[in-house]
Structure formats: structure tokens, C-alpha cells
Amino acid sequence: MAKQPEPESFMDMFSKLGRDLRMPQVDIDAILSHHRKNLEALEKSARATATGASSVMTKQREVLQDSLREITELVQNYRAPGNPQELVAKQADFTRKSFEAAVKNAGEVADIVKKSGTESVDILRARIKDAMDEIRQSYEKK
């Protein structure tokens, strides 16, 4: 029995059609490389965002633990003072400390969020710049 010729692949048939119609050559490797770089940039950006989210959650857990510890200490050490001025002074001091801690912690969480967001955007911005350079270079070659 005679050996049948292997059928052409779809890419071979498409390439032959392009040559027959005298269509411009398409550099598949360049296109795949371009998209691979895009996906790698998206992956790095997502990783930076996930790291930032993890840092925010860690900071929030620390804040909650600190707050619970302070409240526990306050309750354990609470003794009703003899006069109302001392009670008001203790409550005011606790309120002041709580407010200062909340402001400090909110600032730290905001810094973490800003840093991770900036890092993520910088990764994407760099990839967009590189992609534009690649496109510009491909036109300059032609």
C-alpha cells in the first residue's frame, strides 16, 4: 500500500494562501512574544496587588489585637474613682489614646495601599511603554 502524503497543517495552508495572495508576512513569534510580555506584566501587577492586600490585612489584624489588648488592660485595671473628675479624666485619656492610635493606624494602612497600588500601576505603565516602543520599532523596520 502506498504511503499517503501527510495533510498540511492549518498554519501551512494559511501561510501558502498568504504567499499566493502576496499578503505581508506576519511574524507570529513576535506577536506571541508581545502577548507573553503583556501576560507577565499583568501577573506581576496582580502579585503586587495581592501582596499589598495581604499587608493591609496583616496590619488590620495587628490593630485589632492591639485594641483588644488595650481594652482588656483598661477593664482589668478599672477601679471606679472616688470623684467624677477622675472618672472623666480617665475616660478622656482613653478616648485620646484610642483616637491617636486610630489615626496612626489609618495612616499606615493608607500608606500600604498607596504603595501597592503605585507599584501595580508602575508595572503596567512600564509594560505599556515597552509595548509602544515595540510597535514603533516594528514600523521603523518596514
Image: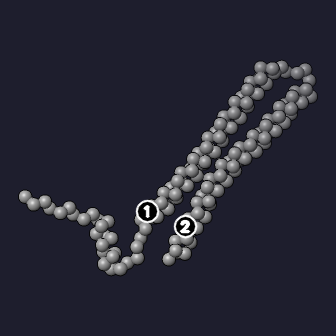
| Left or right: 29, with 72 as reference point | left
View extreme (left): residue: 1
- Looking at the image, can residue 26 be seen? yes
| Left or right: 74, with 121 as reference point | right
Q: Say which of 111 and 7 sits in front.
A: 7
Callout 2: 10 Å neighbours few (<14), some, many (20+)?
A: some
Q: Say which of 84 and 135 sits in front.
A: 135
Callout 1: 10 Å neighbours few (<14), some, many (20+)?
A: few
Q: Please tell me in which quadrant of the rendered image residue 77 appears.
A: top right
Vertical placement of residue 132 versus 61, above or below? below
Q: Identify the residue position indicated by label 2 in the image.
A: 134
View extreme (front): residue: 2
Q: Say which of 46 and 5 sits in front.
A: 5
Q: Identify the residue position indicated by label 1 in the image.
A: 29
* Residue 41, position as x, y percentages in the image: 55, 55
| Left or right: 73, with 2 as reference point | right
- Looking at the image, can residue 128 be seen? no
**Which image quarter is the N terminus in?**
bottom left
Q: Residue at x 58, y 60 (%)?
A: 127
* Residue 66, position as x, y percentages in the image: 73, 30
* Residue 72, position as x, y percentages in the image: 74, 24
| Left or right: 66, with 137 as reference point | right
* Residue 129, position as x, y percentages in the image: 61, 64
Whole-number angstrom distance, CA of label 2 to CA of label 1: 13 Å
Secondary structure under tag 2 reads: helix
Secondary structure under tag 1 reads: helix
Q: How many marks?
A: 2
Q: Residue at x 53, y 51 (%)?
A: 43
Amino acid, disc 1: Asp
Q: Residue at x 58, y 63 (%)?
A: 130
Amino acid, disc 2: Glu
Vertical placement of residue 142 versus 37, above or below? below
